[in-house]
Amino acid sequence: MSGINIGVLAVQGDVAENVMATKMAIEDLGMDGIVTEVKTPEQIEDLDGLVIPGGESTVIGTLSLVNGSLKKIKEKIASGMPVFGICAGMIMLSKKAKDRVVGEMDQPLLDYLDVRIERNTFGRQKDSFESEISMEKIGISKFQGVFIRAPSIIETGKDVEIISKFNEKIIAVKQGNILGTSFHPELTGDISLHKYFVGLVKAKH
Ligand SMILES: NC(=O)CC[C@H](N)C(=O)O
């Protein structure tokens, strides 16, 4: 069997950091695989897994809609491709998102992860913070959560597993092959969560 091919959606946001963390995860697991920045539907078609980085979800959504990659990502998720949405990436995966300040938003979403999200739950850029969190359910007992204009999950559907909470707020979830976090693992130097995701991709490969 050939190596795995993981893409990092390179529209906007923390792309390079996620390419690096995913490459390190593959290497650390002793696996054969490549990680590439992807933008177009053609590049997304060939992937075994996709990371959607944090950034600004309205920008990522609108640009992906315009160039046709949103539709292609939806098709790939429907066919079972594992996907890891980080912060804005998790917002992109959701069925419904509102903003803490602005309220209901009509922004392009992938409409897969059965959750309702509140954007900017923890405040603005200046309210960014770090805190130790835990994800026992997926075997990670200690992790440094980096929260930057981070969302939280305010409602979950029946197929959604809650992986972590911080101050009573849901900050990490899993639904089948879809993984989402409010925080930014690629900014910590700890690749355990990226390794977990690569494991999902491998299992599906
Ligand atoms: N760090 C991030 O990805 C922030 C997400 C951003 N607040 C949004 O709503 O899209």
Image (cartoon, rainbow, N blue to C red):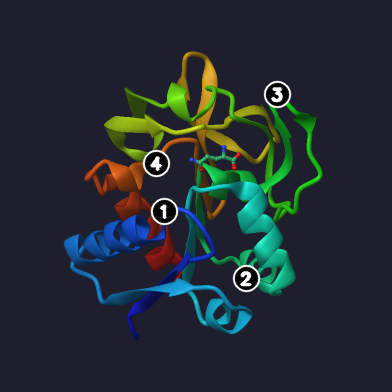
Q: Determine the CA span between mark 3 and mark 2.
A: 33 Å
Of the residues shown, which amino acid type is indicated by label 4? His
Binning the other alpha carbons within 10 Å of mark 1 as few (below 14), some (14 to 19) or many (20 upward) gives many
Q: Determine the CA span between mark 4 and mark 3.
A: 22 Å
Q: Determine the CA span between mark 4 and mark 2.
A: 24 Å
Residue behind label 1 places its C-beta within 8 angstroms of ligand 1:
yes
Q: Determine the CA span between mark 1 and mark 2.
A: 22 Å
Q: Which mark is residue 76?
A: 2
Precedes in sequence: disc 1 or disc 4: 1
Of the residues shown, which amino acid type is indicated by label 2? Lys
Res 127 quadrant in image: top left
Image x and y of residue 96, in percent: 75, 40
Precedes in sequence: disc 3 or disc 2: 2
- Whether residues under marks 4 and 2 lie with C-beta atoms below 8 angstroms apart, the answer is no
Which residue position is annotated with label 1? 14
Which residue position is annotated with label 4? 184
Of the residues shown, which amino acid type is indicated by label 1? Asp
**Left or right position of 61 against 204:** right
Image x and y of residue 122, in percent: 53, 22
Q: Which residue is nearer to you in this view: 161 or 99?
A: 99
Residue behind label 4 places its C-beta within 8 angstroms of ligand 1:
yes
Q: Residue furthest front?
A: 126
Res 45 quadrant in image: bottom right
- Whether residues under marks 3 and 1 lie with C-beta atoms below 8 angstroms apart, the answer is no
The residue at 73%/52% (across/down) is 111
Of badges 1 and 2, nearer the viewer stands 1
